[in-house]
Image (cartoon, grey):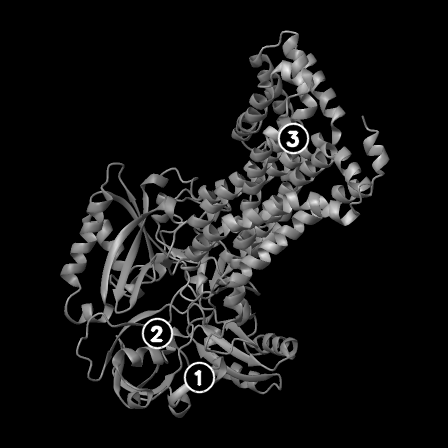
């Protein structure tokens, strides 16, 4: 019986090849898109799932507030781990994790080869008791017990030692510290939120930092018991803050509190500063879920529209089958079965599309979306279930609609089936294009915002600046000689030393100033630069002088602040010069200059108070300004200079504009995905429009012939047929525009500085959508308009 049913269905598909092809192509594209989006979403949601104690692992967050500055930070001082380990019984294990390589690449030397690694971190021995990072070689219980030990991933072990066994061999860190390899870690899964390449024992730097609230450089992870109350643990930290943050210390650091963040929330966190690794976005992930559902819905709407549009062809078949005894239930089962066959054919094709396209999509968006139908038993179950859902969603209305025909009316020719479904089909077309237009608007807005970030004047000259992370002590020791040699090359204008990379300056401090009455909760960002920093970076000095008239050995500290800070103090730029000032906990000194406000963080945050000074041990980057069109020569000279002065050194120079672009990688990835999925939604919608146009032309074939005989020209007929669909797209524009404006405005609120949504965006998007719709229906309309009217009249 099943064989006979499949045979009948395939014969029907063969008879209506054009509509069957459109249905299969539309459904398969919709399902393939849904599969790819689902793979992306599941990957984003799967981060850190491989840890067996994932539900018991938390990261301690610092809540910092002072003045206009309120932040959640992933870092704490060493005091936090000490409290958790010694004063909270519910805590089973505590580990400090210091991913110092993410700030400045660490230099690792093996024999005569030097490498720079960003995934270098220090960790307590208990780190491997909390997390399930498996060692291929070595004992996880003891691998980090000694201060001079290091664990390498398989990837780094192969990179450093080739096929040789790395266990027991030495690695020199930053040119002055020799560490022994005591473990080789199996490469962490791609869905790990912690970037790990080289993991050194925290015991090597333990004495340097002691047990203090500051500096806040370390992630603190805790493993709690099953029944632990995380609120009580947070309260313990709060009580400690209230008892120990008093007097001068409280003034210096503003208001501080702590909370616990579940491991499962780390990857898709929102609004947390100083984190490392690639992070996802919870809102964007949820948005893609809806996009996938909408695209699948568009494909189902195509099927509904094309199936009901062909009802006039099938009406006589329905009438005859009912006269011969078929019940309505039998007809419904028949048409649902036909939908099921077509759906599962589409799913097979969709799986092929998804398998082929996923690597290319990963390449486009710079991601690593996994899809392998054989990797899990859940995929076949999902696809089978998806087939049932689509069959019910896309097949129910056509089955109910077709089976409702009355045989007497059909056989007499008085049943106007096509007209009865026109309004419903038009509503579905409007809904389809409303979704597509919204996706187009979203893509345009996101791209314009990304471009705004790259084109906006940031208050400094980011062009033609090369940033060189300084990784080892040998380089620091010879930095003056390096700068002198670089300055002798005609392609290089200036050099300067600085603590951080512009656009990602985050070091938090307090401040005190002459005449300041309220000395609490005054926070600022500190940026350490040398005498040439302002000129090299192109900062605009509006009062006073830069550091060129000072000496790094002066006994008096010198500070330069931005306009935002002096506005808070109620001073004019001229009044600020010579005032007593200190960036806490640094010594009191003098304000010698004021610079115009500049974006030292991304455009997600508003410009806050910033203080420029020179702190020698904070320096970790060298800025090099080069002449326009001489970047290759300058880059070659930089490499040659470092090799000459610091033999064996390894540097990774990057252009500042590229570093700034990385601040918006998430938005760019979202925009790239939106372009892809928006294009697919338009293609699927146009496939349906193409089928409906073909049906309309077929239905009005005789009418078109008569109108041509009565004098209608070709363009009149084309306009008449095209307008029936173009006006539906116009209605879709009018309906979706206000919703799109509200939703996209809400998304732009995530930025302190954003574009405005003008009417022109909606106008051009609407005109573009109507143009695409007109082009889609033009072919069939034109073919009908140029056909011989005599053939149309003779058709019956």
| Disc number for residue 309 | 3
Can residue 128 be seen?
no
Where's residue 220, x and y in %? Answer: 32, 53
Residue for badge 1 = 540
State which mark lies toward you, 3 or 2: 3
In the drawing, does residue 15 fall left or right of residue 687? right
Kind of element beneath mark 2: strand
Q: Which residue reaches farthest front?
A: 710
Residue for badge 2 = 526
How far apart are the two marked residues, 2 and 1, measured between alpha carbons?
Answer: 17 Å
In the drawing, does residue 722 fall left or right of residue 387? right
Q: As rendered, which of 674 and 166 lies closer to the eye? A: 674
Placement of 155 over or under 42, stated as above or below:
below
Kind of element beneath mark 1: loop
Placement of 567 over or under 768, stated as above or below:
below
Where's residue 525, x and y in %? Answer: 34, 72
Where's residue 125, x and y in %? Answer: 35, 50
Q: Residue at x 56, y 56 (%)?
A: 160
State which tag comes first along the sequence, 2 or 1: 2
State which mark lies toward you, 2 or 1: 1
State which tag comes first along the sequence, 3 or 2: 3
């Amino acid at each position: 019986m099943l064989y006979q049913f499949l045979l009948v269905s395939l014969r029907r598909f063969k008879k209506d090849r054009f509509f069957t092809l459109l249905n299969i192509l539309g459904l398969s594209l919709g399902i393939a898109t849904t599969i790819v989006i689902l793979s992306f979403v599941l990957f984003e949601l799967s981060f850190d799932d491989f840890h067996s104690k994932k539900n018991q692992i938390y990261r301690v967050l610092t809540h910092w507030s002072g003045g206009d500055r309120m932040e959640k930070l992933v870092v704490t001082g060493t005091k936090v781990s000490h409290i958790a380990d010694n004063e909270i019984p519910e805590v089973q294990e505590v580990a400090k994790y210091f991913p110092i390589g993410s700030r400045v690449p660490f230099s690792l030397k093996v024999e005569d080869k030097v490498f720079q690694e960003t995934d270098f971190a220090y960790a307590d021995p208990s780190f491997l008791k909390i997390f399930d990072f498996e060692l291929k070689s070595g004992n996880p219980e003891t691998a980090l017990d000694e201060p001079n030990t290091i664990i390498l991933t398989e990837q780094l072990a192969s990179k450093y030692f080739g096929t040789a066994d790395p266990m027991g061999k030495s690695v020199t860190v930053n040119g002055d510290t020799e560490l022994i390899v005591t473990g080789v870690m199996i490469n962490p899964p791609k869905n790990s939120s912690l970037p790990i390449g080289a993991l050194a024992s925290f015991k090597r730097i333990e004495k340097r930092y002691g047990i203090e609230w500051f500096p806040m450089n370390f992630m603190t992870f805790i493993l709690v018991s099953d029944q632990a109350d995380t609120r009580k643990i947070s309260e313990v930290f709060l009580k400690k803050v209230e008892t120990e943050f008093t007097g001068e210390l409280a003034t210096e650091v503003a208001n501080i509190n702590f909370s616990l963040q579940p491991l499962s929330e780390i990857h898709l966190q929102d609004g947390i500063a100083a984190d490392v690794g690639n992070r996802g976005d919870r809102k964007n992930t949820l948005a893609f879920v809806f996009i996938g559902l909408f695209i699948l819905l568009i494909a189902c709407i195509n099927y509904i529209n094309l199936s009901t549009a062909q009802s006039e062809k099938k009406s006589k078949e329905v009438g005859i089958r009912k006269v011969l005894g078929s019940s309505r239930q039998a007809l419904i089962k028949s048409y649902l079965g036909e939908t099921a066959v077509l759906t599962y054919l589409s799913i097979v094709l969709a799986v092929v599309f998804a398998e082929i396209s996923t690597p290319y999509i990963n390449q486009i968006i710079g991601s690593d979306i996994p899809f392998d139908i054989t990797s899990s038993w859940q995929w076949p179950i999902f696809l089978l279930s998806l087939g049932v859902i689509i069959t019910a969603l896309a097949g129910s209305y056509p089955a109910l609609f077709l089976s409702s025909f009355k045989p007497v009316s059909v056989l007499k020719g008085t049943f106007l089936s096509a007209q009865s479904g026109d309004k419903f089909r038009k509503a579905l077309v409007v809904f389809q294009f409303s979704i597509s237009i919204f996706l187009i608007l979203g893509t345009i807005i996101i791209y314009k915002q990304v471009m705004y970030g790259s084109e906006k004047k940031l208050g400094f000259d980011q062009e033609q600046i090369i940033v060189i992370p300084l990784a080892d002590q040998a380089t620091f020791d010879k930095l003056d000689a390096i700068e002198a040699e670089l300055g002798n090359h005609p392609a290089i204008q200036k050099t300067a030393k600085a603590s951080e990379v512009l656009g990602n300056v985050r070091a938090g401090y307090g401040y005190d100033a002459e005449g300041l009455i309220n000395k609490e909760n005054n926070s600022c960002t500190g940026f350490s630069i040398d005498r040439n920093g302002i000129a090299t970076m192109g900062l605009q000095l509006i009062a006073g002088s830069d550091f060129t008239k000072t000496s790094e050995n002066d006994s008096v500290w010198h500070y330069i602040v931005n306009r935002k800070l002096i506005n808070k103090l109620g001073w004019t730029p001229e009044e600020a010069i010579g005032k007593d000032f200190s960036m806490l906990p640094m010594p009191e000194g003098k304000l010698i200059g004021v610079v115009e406000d500049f974006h030292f963080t991304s455009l997600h945050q508003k410009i806050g108070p910033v203080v420029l000074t020179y702190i020698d041990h904070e320096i970790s980057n060298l800025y090099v300004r080069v002449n326009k069109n001489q970047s290759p020569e300058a880059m070659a000279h930089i490499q040659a200079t470092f090799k000459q002065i610091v033999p064996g050194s390894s540097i990774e120079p990057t252009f500042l504009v590229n570093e700034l672009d990385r601040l918006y990688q998430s938005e760019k990835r979202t925009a790239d995905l939106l372009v892809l999925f928006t294009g697919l939604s338009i293609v699927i919608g146009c496939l349906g429009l193409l089928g409906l146009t073909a049906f309309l032309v077929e239905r009005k074939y005789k009418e078109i012939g008569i109108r041509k005989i009565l004098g209608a020209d070709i363009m009149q007929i084309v306009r008449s047929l095209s307008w029936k669909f173009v006006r539906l797209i116009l209605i879709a524009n009018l309906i979706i525009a206000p919703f799109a404006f509200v939703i996209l405005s809400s998304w732009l609120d995530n930025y302190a500085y954003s574009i405005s949504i003008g009417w022109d965006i909606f106008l051009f998007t609407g005109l573009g959508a109507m143009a695409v719709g007109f082009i889609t229906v033009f072919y069939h309309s034109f073919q009908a308009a140029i056909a011989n009217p005599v053939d149309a009249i003779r058709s019956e």
